[in-house]
Amino acid sequence: MLADLGNEHILNNKKYIFEAKLDGIRAICIKENKKLRFFSRNGIDITNQYPEFDFFKSIEADNCALDGEIVVYDENGNPSFALWQERKERKSSSLMATYVVFDILFADGKDLTRIPLIKRKNIIEKIVKSGNRIQTSFWTENGMALWNVIQTRKLEGVIAKDASSFYEIGKRSGSWLKIKIFKTIDCVVFGFTQEKRAVTSLTLGL
């Protein structure tokens, strides 16, 4: 499930719950046959890239599918995409990743995508025990308070999620809205690509 763009007015909307927008990579965690596997958003098996994800016993279900973000925290406890990139390039083997769980698709053979998000959150809290290299995503009903914390810590932004929404696989829905803290800078655009949309990526000069 993907998020559309939102704005700060959503932060006071009582039908949403709010989470920090984490600066990492999206991944699905599958627990089955007494092992864990991880898949990127485009379906690539990335399990072998994260040998530290040895938290099988922290997930108290025989089988399940979790949705979350793989992050690397800096010395201040903030997720850092730059550190994740450094880890991926093996420039520092000491950088350890953490899997942050924010949703669940099924558990013990039961499809959970058609029950409200707030109930899925309750199921996550019962199944996932935060510990070494795994944690559940913090969420709150007070969007403005979280927004203020995000600004103070200079993080990416906030994700607003309709508490009554179902999990819509592969869809970009207004049920999830990303509210970004935008930063501006003057630069030169040298080129762009169009693989997936009008502008997929940019080459910039500072």
Image (tube, helix red, strand yellow):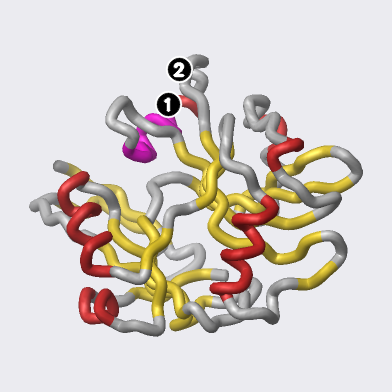
Type of secondary structure dominating the magenta stretch: helix
Real-space Cα separation, disc 2 to disc 1, in angstroms: 6 Å
* Residue 175 among magenta residues: no
Residue 198 in view: no
Q: Nearer the viewer, residue 89 or 136?
A: 136
Q: Is residue 121 left or right of residue 66?
A: left
Could you tell me residue 131's position as x and y percent?
58, 34
Quick one: quadrant of the N terminus?
bottom right
Element assignment for label 2: loop
Residue 43's image quarter?
bottom right
Boundaries of the magenta span = 78-86
Residue 180 is tagged as none
Q: Are marks 2 and 1 in contact (CB under 8 Å)?
A: yes
Of the two numbered discs 2 and 1 on the same chain, state the one appearing first in sequence.
1
Question: Residue drawn at (44%, 64%), measured in percent from left and top?
Answer: 194
Question: Residue drawn at (45%, 45%), measured in percent from left and top?
Answer: 24
Residue 83 in view: yes
**Label 1: how many Cα within 10 Å (few below 14, some 14–19, many 20+):** some
Question: Residue drawn at (39%, 30%), measured in percent from left and top?
Answer: 83
Check disc 1 and report the residue beneath it: 86
Amino acid carrying mark 2 in the image: Lys
Check disc 2 and report the residue beneath it: 91
Could you tell me residue 4's position as x and y percent?
41, 75
Question: Residue drawn at (82%, 69%), measured in percent from left and top?
Answer: 110
Q: Residue furthest right?
A: 33
**As displayed, is residue 74 above or below residue 39?**
above
**As displayed, is residue 181 above or below residue 96?**
below
Could you tell me residue 183's position as x and y percent?
15, 55
How many numbered markers are drawn?
A: 2
* Residue 81 among magenta residues: yes
Amino acid carrying mark 1 in the image: Glu
